[in-house]
Amino acid sequence: MRTDDLIARLSTGLVPVKRVTPPMLAALGWLALALAVVSVGVAIAGFRHDIEQRLMLMHEQVNLAAALLTGTAAAIAAFHLALPDRSNRWALLPLPFAVFWISGLGWGCVTEFVEQGWPALGTSFSCMSFIMGFGVPLTLAMLWMTRHAAPIRPAPVAALAGLAAAAIASIGLSLSHHLDAAAMVLIWHGGSVLLVMLLSQRWGARAMCALGP
Amino acid sequence: MTATTDARATQEVRWGGLLAAAQGGDARAYDTLLREVTPRIRSLCRNRLRDTAEVEDAVQDTLLTLHALRHTYDPERPFGPWITTIATRRAIDRLRRHGRAGGRESNIDDLPESAAAVAPVAEERLAARNLRDAVAQLPESQRTALRLAKLEDLSLVEASARSGLSVGALKVATHRAMQTLRRRFGASE
């Protein structure tokens, strides 16, 4: 087909379109949804029995704030990056917060090791299922909201969507699940967040296309 | 230099206005925009691709993506970066596919006996022409699906991103196109 014919075809019978929601507004909308969903999850699972003492601990407050900042920054970055005219550098926005979050957990591991020796490591599939259970549907919600990124930058947007969703889910997990050892938190929280992010990066483009134009 | 930059900026402001009007359903503004912006798209694609036919295919891919993403343009923001990202993306896709295809192909001119072995005979030419005619008679969506999924060997996700059709619609269109061609040439299912 000639390019002139294609242009004629595209402009014939043109229908009005609704502009996409501005990225900051969309990010706030998604964050409100994510926090509401995770709050319901915590309400159903119940707070951990020592929640009041835990919330008084400095490192726990820092951990929760870092997870919230990482999730918020990743959501803002994903909605910006989904638009063609935004810089690729938006992808870097959550990086400092994520590094701060992970290094905080890593530092916790080191201090615990110095004070108590090698921690007792075990499996905690309930952590993984909480983060996967809330993270995957919230990722899908964001993939649907950013589906216009499919022809432009599907993989980075999907990875950021996975990071945002899993980080917010991990806040709910910290409030409801009794897991003290920083090494366990790092392995099971951090590992689950990474898993959701990688799954989204791998399958996100396909999901965006399947969720509609 | 400054005059060129100013002219370019003025042009982009005009294109932004035309696209904003097109978002509201103004077909004439949209037609004008696409015709005016095509040389810019061609120039952007030429920065990445050498082959003229490849450039033109990338231009058409860009126009299709522009159409699918026209709701993502914010009239408050400059038009230039918006169209540059779309055109560059489509040109890079072409380049990558070309690289992939290149890995599977070898130049038959380098093989001494190939000329005699694959010399096209009249019958083959006729069959090829019949096939081309049959493909040309397919509906637009089926032809696009066939081109992307079968001839260019794209994955469904890539073909969907390029054409703006959903994966489901592409599967159906490709299946129907193959059925029509099979019927036309009397092949069994």
Image (cartoon, coloured by chain):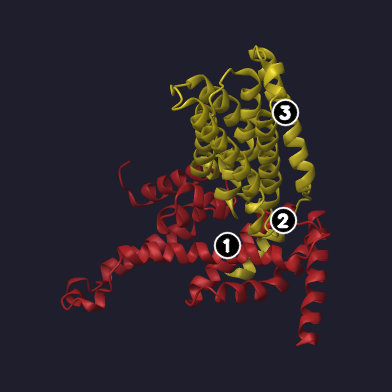
Chain colours: A yellow, B red
Residue B14: x and y in percent read 82, 70
Q: Which residue is mark 3?
A: A35
Point out which mark residue B89 bears.
1
Residue B36: x and y in percent read 73, 73
Point out which mark residue B70 bears.
2
**Picture residue at 65% right of the left edge, 35% below the top:** A67
User: In what quadrant of the picture does the C terminus of chain A appear?
Assistant: top right
Is residue A140 visible to the viewer in this orientation of the structure? no
**Picture residue at 70% right of the left edge, 60% below the top:** A85
**Picture residue at 57% right of the left edge, 31% below the top:** A136
Amino acid type, residue under disc 2 in the picture: Arg
Dot 1 crowding, Cα within 10 Å, few <14, some 14–19, many 20+: many
Amino acid type, residue under disc 1 in the picture: Arg
Is residue B146 visible to the viewer in this orientation of the structure? yes
In this rendering, the answer to whether A117 lies above or below B156 is above
In this rendering, the answer to whether B57 lies above or below A205 is below
Q: Nearer the viewer, residue A81 or B180?
A: A81
**Left or right of residue B11: residue A106:** left
Q: What is the spatial separation of the Cα atoms under label 1 and label 3, in whole angstroms?
A: 35 Å
Q: What is the spatial separation of the Cα atoms under label 2 and label 3, in whole angstroms?
A: 31 Å
Q: In terms of secondary structure, where does tag 3 sit?
A: helix
Amino acid type, residue under disc 3 in the picture: Leu
Q: What is the spatial separation of the Cα atoms under label 1 and label 2, in whole angstroms?
A: 16 Å
**Going from the N terminus, do you reach mark 1 or mark 2 first?**
2
